[in-house]
């Protein structure tokens, strides 16, 4: 190989390295953090977008479903990509694992009636999320007026419980495929809610009860009863309704004594994170809606 050809190839390799280095630099970083709450070792993943200044950014807390975990939730939702463009920090907390070694990373939240070991042990997951917010703020100096919570299934139920019990800490919640699992929620009236649910969900059915594919072993509250409890103290008018592409039904509640409530019912939607990369996702699930994008589009409107 001639010297001139070698120089040319070296230049091409250096150019490619520079290009790919720039692309890589634009991606943020995920780190695992640990803390002890109520005598229990807890952990969470934090994703920070690659920005020159990450102070005073909003925080999005993303709660995994029952038998899931933080690492899977991070990969499944694609929320990091939304955070890169939306410029917010993402936290993926871990619930409590099962009793046996092979169940340690199959985790649940104590959302009230559901689910698993977290409920059986009466784990104070509300306190955990409070301490998580404090811990993240001490490390990254977030905008505590813009802390949002979303979650899937058992994680959605936990998002509701947080709005009910620590509404002063939460600027908005976006539950996906999970209903209210506590019996009193008047405290959440000033927390905006966007609920996303598939009309063919067989784990947490819209009509409530034990779904055909449910592994929780509890009768879930129906979606209509959940919305009724949420809007009750808010004194809401009859919802404005419209239909989006793919037959997605949107109901928007305007309330005179509380924050707005919005409901997305996905035609043909099953127990998945729409637009996600989960084991049960199908290409059609994200054809018309990305739950992660909708989560941010809704949440970013609100501040405490």
Image (cartoon, rainbow, N blue to C red):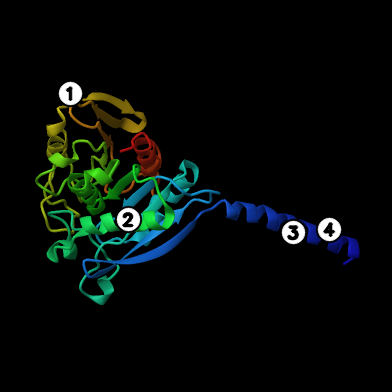
Report which residue position mark 3 lands on.
14
- The 10 Å Cα crowd at callout 4, few under 14, some 14 to 19, many 20 or more, is few
- The 10 Å Cα crowd at callout 2, few under 14, some 14 to 19, many 20 or more, is some
Circle 1 or circle 2, nearest the eye: 2
| Quarter containing the C terminus | top left
In percent of the image, x 30 and y 47: which residue is there? 149
Measured in 3D between alpha carbons, the distance from the residue under mark 4 to the one under mark 1, in whole angstroms, is 70 Å
Lateral position of residue 106 relative to residue 26, left or right: left
- Sequence-wise first label, 3 or 1: 3
Q: Secondary structure at mark 4?
A: helix
Where residue 234 appears, as percent x and y from the top left, is 16, 31
Circle 3 or circle 4, nearest the eye: 3
- The 10 Å Cα crowd at callout 3, few under 14, some 14 to 19, many 20 or more, is few
User: In front here: 57 or 106?
Assistant: 57
Report which residue position mark 2 lands on.
134
Circle 4 or circle 1, nearest the eye: 1
Quadrant in the rendering for residue 188: top left
Measured in 3D between alpha carbons, the distance from the residue under mark 3 to the one under mark 1, in whole angstroms, is 62 Å
- Sequence-wise first label, 3 or 2: 3
- Sequence-wise first label, 4 or 2: 4
User: In front here: 264 or 158?
Assistant: 158
Report which residue position mark 4 lands on.
8
Lateral position of residue 18 relative to residue 208, left or right: right
Report which residue position mark 1 lands on.
237
Where residue 133 appears, as percent x and y from the top left, is 32, 54
- The 10 Å Cα crowd at callout 1, few under 14, some 14 to 19, many 20 or more, is few
């Amino acid at each position: 190989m001639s010297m001139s050809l070698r120089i040319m190839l070296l230049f091409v390799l250096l150019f490619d390295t520079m290009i790919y280095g720039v692309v890589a630099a634009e991606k943020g970083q995920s780190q695992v953090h640990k803390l002890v709450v109520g005598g229990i070792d807890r952990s969470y993943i934090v994703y920070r977008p690659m920005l020159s200044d990450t102070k005073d950014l909003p925080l999005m807390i993303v709660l995994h479903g029952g038998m899931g975990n933080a690492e899977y939730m991070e990969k499944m939702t694609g929320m990091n990509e939304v955070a890169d463009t939306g410029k917010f920090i993402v936290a993926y907390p871990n619930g409590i694992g099962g009793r046996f070694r092979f169940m340690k990373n199959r985790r649940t939240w104590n959302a009230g009636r559901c689910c698993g070991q977290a409920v059986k042990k009466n784990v104070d997951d509300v306190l955990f999320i409070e301490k998580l917010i404090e811990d993240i703020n001490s490390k990254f100096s977030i905008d505590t007026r813009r802390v949002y919570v979303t979650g899937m299934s058992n994680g959605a139920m936990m998002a509701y419980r947080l709005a009910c019990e620590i509404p002063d800490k939460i600027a908005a919640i976006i539950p996906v495929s999970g209903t209210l699992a506590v019996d009193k929620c008047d405290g959440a009236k000033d927390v905006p809610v966007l609920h996303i649910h598939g009309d063919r969900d067989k784990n947490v059915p819209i009509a409530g009860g034990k779904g055909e594919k449910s592994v929780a072993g509890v009768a879930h509250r129906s979606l209509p009863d959940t919305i009724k409890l949420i809007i009750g103290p808010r004194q809401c008018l009859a919802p404005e309704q419209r239909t989006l592409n793919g037959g997605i039904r949107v109901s928007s509640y305007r309330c005179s004594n509380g924050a707005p409530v919005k409901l997305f019912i996905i035609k043909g939607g099953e127990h998945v994170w729409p637009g996600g990369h989960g084991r049960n996702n199908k290409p059609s699930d994200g054809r018309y809606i990305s739950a992660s994008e909708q989560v941010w589009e809704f949440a970013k409107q609100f501040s405490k």
